Image: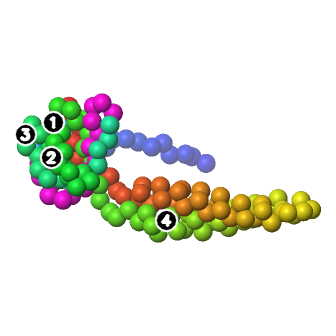
Amino acid sequence: MKTKMLSLGPATILVAAIMLGSIPAASVKAQSSLHDWSTVQAVAADERLVVEKKDGKTITGKMIEATATNLTISRRGKVENIPRENIQQIYHSTGKAEKAKWAGIGAGIGTAAGGGIGAAKAASVSDDGGIYVLAGLLIGAGAGAVSGLAFGESRRHRELIYTTP
């Protein structure tokens, strides 16, 4: 039985080289647009932004305006001005955080798990084992609600629109 070797002709090599050469150009173009402040200035008013400052603090608010030197957002009913030189990255946050929905789902799952664990513990105790079921239900519901709330908040989509050069 004869095996056929894969033969790469000059045309195939040329096409591969062109394709590989165009990849860095595309990534440089994408990176340069992340350093373009006009992208931030193009964000519509009342859009949700997440601003990471150079000192490590994160500020979330709604866009008011972006000038050449300053970003103004509304945060908790107050206007906040952030100098452009203090900004590390800006994310455009879209989608709705369904915190109540996920907190309810988490509370339900936590209640069931806590009740099950409490019931298992109560089965091994001869007297007053019902307290374990009650404690398991309460602790499970609380932990599940908090976990669901955090998960629901994270359901928003964040897109990086600006980073400092």
Marks 3,4: beta carbons within 8 A: no
**Nearest the camera: 30 or 66?**
66
- If you read the primary sequence from the N terminus, does the residue marked by circle 3 or circle 4 appear first? 3
- If you read the primary sequence from the N terminus, does the residue marked by circle 4 or circle 2 appear first? 2
Q: Which residues are magenta?
A: 39-56
Marks 1,4: beta carbons within 8 A: no
Mark 1 and mark 3: span between their CA atoms?
10 Å
Q: Residue at left 29%, top 44%?
A: 59
Q: Which residue is mark 2?
A: 72
Q: Is residue 88 magenta?
A: no
Q: Residue at left 32%, top 41%?
A: 58
**Nearest the camera: 34 or 79?**
79
Horizontal side of 17 relative to 68 (left or right) equals right
Q: Residue 68's mark? A: 3
Q: Residue at left 57%, top 46%?
A: 2
Mark 2 belongs to which amino acid? Answer: Thr
Helix, strand or loop for disc 2: strand
Helix, strand or loop for disc 1: strand
Q: Residue 83's mark? A: 1
Q: Which residue is mark 4?
A: 102
- If you read the primary sequence from the N terminus, does the residue marked by circle 1 or circle 3 appear first? 3
Mark 2 and mark 3: span between their CA atoms?
11 Å
Mark 4 and mark 2: span between their CA atoms?
32 Å
Q: Residue at left 23%, top 46%?
A: 161
Q: Residue 61's mark? A: none
Marks 2,3: beta carbons within 8 A: no
**Nearest the camera: 162 or 7?**
162
Mark 4 belongs to which amino acid? Answer: Trp
* Residue 118, position as x, y percentages in the image: 77, 61
- If you read the primary sequence from the N terminus, does the residue marked by circle 2 or circle 1 appear first? 2
Q: Nearest to the eye among marks 1 and 3: give it.
A: 1
